Image (tube, rainbow, N blue to C red):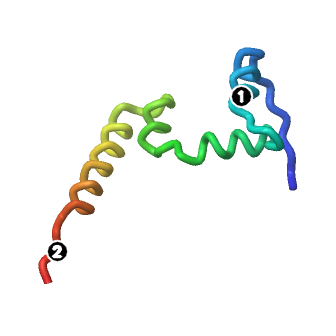
């Protein structure tokens, strides 16, 4: 498996260390805490255009509408 070296601030390291579980590697911790990040959260937290963020948000709204529709058989 390939490995990468990351440089993070001491504050970020301490935050990661606080959420790290016993027997868990830092890689495992990062994977665990980032697996539930939604695409919408990611887009809003980056420097993508507002238009892209708005489009992703609209798609999420449409998906929720589709999920909640009742299908009559």
Q: Nearer the viewer, residue 73 or 44?
A: 73
For the point 80% across and 31% down, the residue is: 6
Residue 16: mark: 1
Lateral position of residue 72 relative to residue 49, left or right: left
67 vs 10: above or below = below
Q: Residue at coordinates 80% horizontally, 39% vertically from top-left? A: 22
Which one is nearer the viewer's eye here, 46 or 72? 72
Q: Nearer the viewer, residue 32 or 22?
A: 22
User: Element at badge 2?
Assistant: loop
The quadrant of the image that shows the C terminus is bottom left
- Look at 77% across and 42% down and name the residue there: 27
56 relative to 58 in the view: left or right: right
Q: Give neighbour class at mark 1: few <14, some 14-19, many 20+ (Cα, 10 Å).
A: some
Asked if 12 appears above or below 50 in the picture, the reply is above
Residue 61 position, x and y percent, is: 26, 49
Q: Give the number of marks.
A: 2
- Check disc 1 and report its element: helix, strand or loop: helix
Q: Quadrant of the N terminus?
A: bottom right
**Where residue 71 is drawn, which disc sits there?**
2
Q: Is residue 5 above or below residue 28?
A: above
């Amino acid at each position: 498996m390939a490995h990468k070296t990351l440089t993070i601030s001491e504050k970020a390291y301490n935050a990661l260390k606080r959420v790290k579980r016993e027997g868990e590697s830092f890689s495992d911790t990062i994977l665990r805490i980032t697996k539930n990040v939604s695409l919408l959260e990611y887009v809003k937290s980056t420097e993508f255009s507002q238009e892209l963020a708005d489009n992703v948000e609209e798609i999420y709204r449409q998906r929720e509408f589709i999920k909640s529709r009742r299908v009559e058989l």
